[in-house]
């Protein structure tokens, strides 16, 4: 499943797989964890301005709580509109 997610996300990001790995792990986790999926969908369905604000707030919270850097990096990837749209599509497929 991770390889498939990585392939799909790479098409939207155009970045190397090593940069996508935290994002792939986040999406895979969210597809399996309803609480994380719900929060991500709620944030990603917002308009661009609100989404950026919510993601930046979430990133600051994660940093304050010393969350693992790969997780923070994965959330940061979602600031890119195309990546956020692709992630939302993948999360809706899990519903």
Image (tube, rainbow, N blue to C red):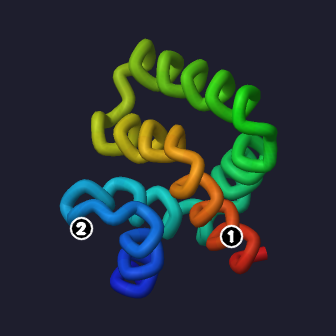
Residue on which the image places disc 2: 17
In the image, residue 83 lies at what x, y percent?
52, 56
Q: Left or right of 43: which side holds 73?
A: left
Residue most extreme to the top: 64
| In the foreground, 19 or 71 | 19
Tell me how far mark 1 sits from mark 2, CA to CA: 19 Å
In the image, taking residue 30 as reference, residue 68 lies left or right, namely left
Q: Residue at x 33, y 65 (%)?
A: 14
Residue plotted at (52% across, 18% down):
61
Spot occupied by residue 25 in the image (x, y as percentages of width and height): 40, 62
Q: Which mark is residue 89?
A: 1
Image quarter in which the C terminus is found: bottom right
Q: Name which of mark 1 and mark 2 comes first in the sequence.
A: 2
Residue neighbourhood size for the residue with mark 2, other residues' Cα within 10 Å, grouped as few (<14), some (14–19), many (≥20): some
Name the residue rendered at 71%, 36% in the picture.
Answer: 48
Assign the N terminus to one quadrant of the image. Answer: bottom left
Judged left or right of residue 50, residue 7 is left
Task: Give the SS element for disc 2.
Answer: helix
Q: Quadrant of residue 4?
A: bottom left
């Amino acid at each position: 499943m991770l390889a498939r997610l990585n392939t799909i996300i790479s098409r939207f990001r155009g970045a190397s797989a090593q940069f996508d790995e935290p994002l792939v792990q986040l999406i895979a986790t969210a597809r399996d964890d309803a609480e994380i999926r719900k929060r991500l969908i709620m944030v990603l369905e917002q308009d661009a301005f609100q989404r950026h604000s919510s993601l930046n707030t979430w990133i600051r919270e994660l940093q304050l709580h010393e969350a693992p850097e790969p997780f923070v990096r994965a959330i940061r990837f979602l600031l890119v509109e195309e990546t956020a749209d692709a992630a939302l599509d993948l999360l809706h497929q899990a519903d």
